[in-house]
Amino acid sequence: MVYFDASDGLLAPYIDRWYYLNKLHLAYYEKFDKGILYQTSTGTGSNILWHIVPRSASADGHGDIKGYLDGRWRGILGMGSNFTKADIGWYYWFKECRPDQIEYVCARALGIDGSISVETSREAMDRLSQSRQMFEMIGKWEHCRAAQYFDETVREKLKEPQKDFKLFGDGRGGWSLFRAVYEEPRMVDTLDGQQNVWTITNDRDEPCPLGIEIVRGKREVGAPTDYTQPGVLTIAPFTSAEPYRMSETNQFAKYVVGGQKKITDNGPVRDKVTQSFAVSTESRTGESALVYSAENKGGPGGWCGIGRRFDTPLDLSGFEGIGLWLLGDGNHEALRIQLRDPQGRHADVVPTVNFKGWRLLTFPLPAGGVDLSKIEYLLFYFNGVSPNSSVKVMIDGLKALPKLNVLSDIHDPIVRLNGRDIRFPITLSGGEALTNEGPDGIKHWPGGMNPSRSVDLSNAPLQLQPGENRIEFTCDQPERFPGDVQVLLYRMWPMAP
């Protein structure tokens, strides 16, 4: 196969795109001396290539994979009218994505009898937590699609946007389909009775399986109790936004670096990026929080920065970590938190905002380089803001932590379903996952491309009763819960014939 990515990028205002694009592809095609699968990103119906292009790629996979595919779905369905199969992809597999996102794509691919493509590397597959789980899931859908197991009536149902499906073997060499309804994925950093508690309504007249996906992150984090220990120091109270404005004494802009730099009234930005900041009393800690937002009307990699100067440098030399509450928007931008000494040396922590809602984040204070006894500047950057998009976070309770008791493992995770404890006899280390997929059972995934291990809890069915159900996530030693855990819950039921 040969694939010409972005061949639709020829600039029509400067050349006759219809003529030269077709001429380019015909010239390449005529050079092949054997049969080849020739694929382009050009699409069909607007050129003369339909007789040499048997399929077209569509729906690049980044960010909101389900929503992005829905936005492209009408065009994908139209490919069949032009005698062309859709290749749904490429899906970018170099950073974490969820199995339910890829399964959403697989269901549509089966519905139109099209293929799915992913872009990755062996290094990424070994590094990411749920690689093996997702490849096994894709394999199931592809085997079912190749067998043409479901009739046209079922395949039409799989084409419906905004509906999730799951595929299971039926134990007799065939396949069964389930509908699924997912809760919003949630990061759990504290077992505070809020982040770790859900109410899920089963609107069916009978019990249905509760699907569970618990993923332990790899970030080195401290115990949540570190944030409230005696001796913590507030680095910067967010009582006013004025300290973050440029002035003769606050010359932080010289430290904000990046290409296409432009100085605005609100601070340094990349060209075609705007930023704003303000203070809000709608905070997580009950104090004031800093609201920081930006809009990128330019290309990839938008950035901007704000900062403040301390009249008397802070002495953080006796502290091991920093912690803060961060309200994320889930847009995958990076928020750089930077400390600088009078010589301009710096220490950075850079959380990725791949979550929505409040999270308690803790980080070790970087050792070496910067003089922690004389911190003169505090800076916040946005990095990696996507084209034509906006980002917004709230920063609350930025504190220095005297001790950072780094935790990693979760022993015996517990799901408390309607007051009944279901204890999973495993240890979840960084980069590992625990799943319950109903008919496929409970599995412990050690990360990367390593195979799963079955967890036998046959005497503890995870069933949602009709009506409201209360679910709580905890563990055997809640006082040692490390946080940095993503929990995804869902309900599922067999599809009617």
Image: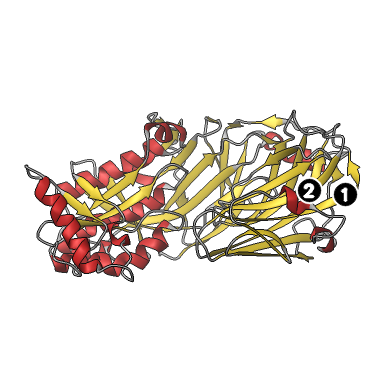
Q: Is residue 456 visible?
A: no
Pick the front one: 36 or 161: 36
Locate residue 359, reporting x and y percent. Answer: 66, 50
Location of residue 372 with respect to 271 vertically, above or below = above
Q: Is residue 66 visible?
A: yes
Q: Are marks 1 and 2 in contact (CB under 8 Å)?
A: yes
Question: Which image quadrant is residue 181 in?
Answer: bottom left
Locate residue 81, reporting x and y percent. Answer: 15, 69
Horizontal relation, residue 465 to residue 26: left or right:
right
- Please state which amino acid type lies under the numbered disc 2: Leu
Residue 56 is marked as none
Question: Which image quadrant is residue 364 in?
Answer: top right
Q: Which residue is mark 2?
A: 378
The residue carrying pointer 2 sits among few (fewer than 14), some (14 to 19) or many (20 or more) residues within 10 Å by Cα, namely many
Considering only order in the chain, which callout, 2 or 1, is on the residue closer to the N terminus? 1
Question: Which image quadrant is residue 125 in?
Answer: top left
Cα distance between the residues tagged 1 and 2: 8 Å
- Please state which amino acid type lies under the numbered disc 1: Phe
Locate residue 36, reporting x and y percent. Answer: 12, 45
Residue 310 is marked as 1
For mark 1, give the secondary structure.
strand
Residue occupying the point 41% across, 63% down: 67
Pick the front one: 150 or 293: 293
Pick the front one: 368 or 63: 368
For mark 2, give the secondary structure.
strand
Instruction: Pick the quarter of the image with the C terminus.
Output: bottom left
